[in-house]
Amino acid sequence: MTRYESRDGRLRLFRGDSHGLHPIASGSIGVILTSPPYWVRGRGRSSAERYAHDLAVGFGREWKRVLAPDGDLWLVIGDRHDGAEWVGMDALVIGWLRRTGWRLQSRGFWAQTRSRERWDNRVNYLLRFRKAGQVVRPRGATLCWMLPLPRSRPDSIWDAIPEPVVRAVLEGSKKRGAVLDPFAGAGTVGRIAASLGRQWVGVERDPSMARVAARRLRLRRVRASRAPFRPSV
Ligand SMILES: C[S@@+](CC[C@H](N)C(=O)[O-])C[C@H]1O[C@@H](n2cnc3c(N)ncnc32)[C@H](O)[C@@H]1O
């Protein structure tokens, strides 16, 4: 994997497929916060189920390995009407993660104002999971926002998670251990994590998006090392 990092080594980005997170040491991550690519092309139940299964099983195995036992997994999941019915993608993802040993701890959403999409494409669920047996006590905070879609970077084809959502999530999550975004996009989670004094690791498959993120975070390309990345706490 091509690797980029900040001068002080607190921000790192790997250019590669996050089905495999082998450069990251087991149990070294405190919070995973990410918005996977939404299910936009498919239609019908079996396609929706395949998407949820690939996310929870195909990617989830590595999330479980790198996350600390009491770490938080936050997913932003888009939902939509597929022409025949409202899909309920959040429920499909919750179901598959539950079967693979995760438990839902918080559920919120942000709805987009001034969306380019039809009304029924505007809901983004925010789901917090922990490994089975690691319960989070409910807090007073309401995880609910009406926000304009963040203006995409001119050089990014992806939309970012809005900053108030990222801040609220990181402020309410486990404070020790690095923050991981396995679908790093333009690196927005990394920028906010850095501003809160957190270490951050990103993984991005698309080389041009990885370059955008590296530029925004002022990372330089470094020689890949064989030793797994073990963030200091
Ligand atoms: C919705 S964007 C993420 C936006 C990002 N969280 C932000 O706030 O800027 C999804 C990103 O996941 C990347 N991606 C898709 N499949 C991937 C994979 N298997 N491994 C790593 N990155 C992947 C895409 O290239 C895209 O940049």
Image (cartoon, helix red, strand yellow):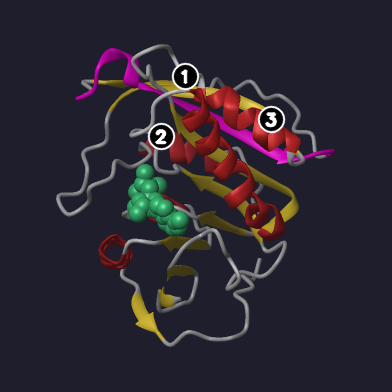
Mark toward the start of the polypeptide (1 vs 3)? 1
Q: CA distance from mark 1 to mark 3?
A: 19 Å
**Magenta span includes 132:** yes
The dot on residue 104 is 3
Please report the bounds of the magenta region as a residue range.
116-133
Q: CA distance from mark 3 to mark 2?
A: 21 Å
135 up-or-down from 190: above or below: above
Per the image, the residue denoted by label 1 is 87
99 or 49: nearer the viewer: 49
Q: CA distance from mark 2 to mark 1?
A: 10 Å
Q: Amino acid at mark 3?
A: Leu
Kindly state the secondary structure of the residue where label 1 is placed: loop
Name, please, the residue furthest toward the right. Answer: 133
Mark toward the start of the polypeptide (3 vs 2)? 2
90 or 66: nearer the viewer: 90
Per the image, the residue denoted by label 2 is 39
Q: Residues within 10 Å of mark 1 (few under 14, many from 20)?
A: some
> Which tag is nearer the camera, tag 3 or tag 2?
2
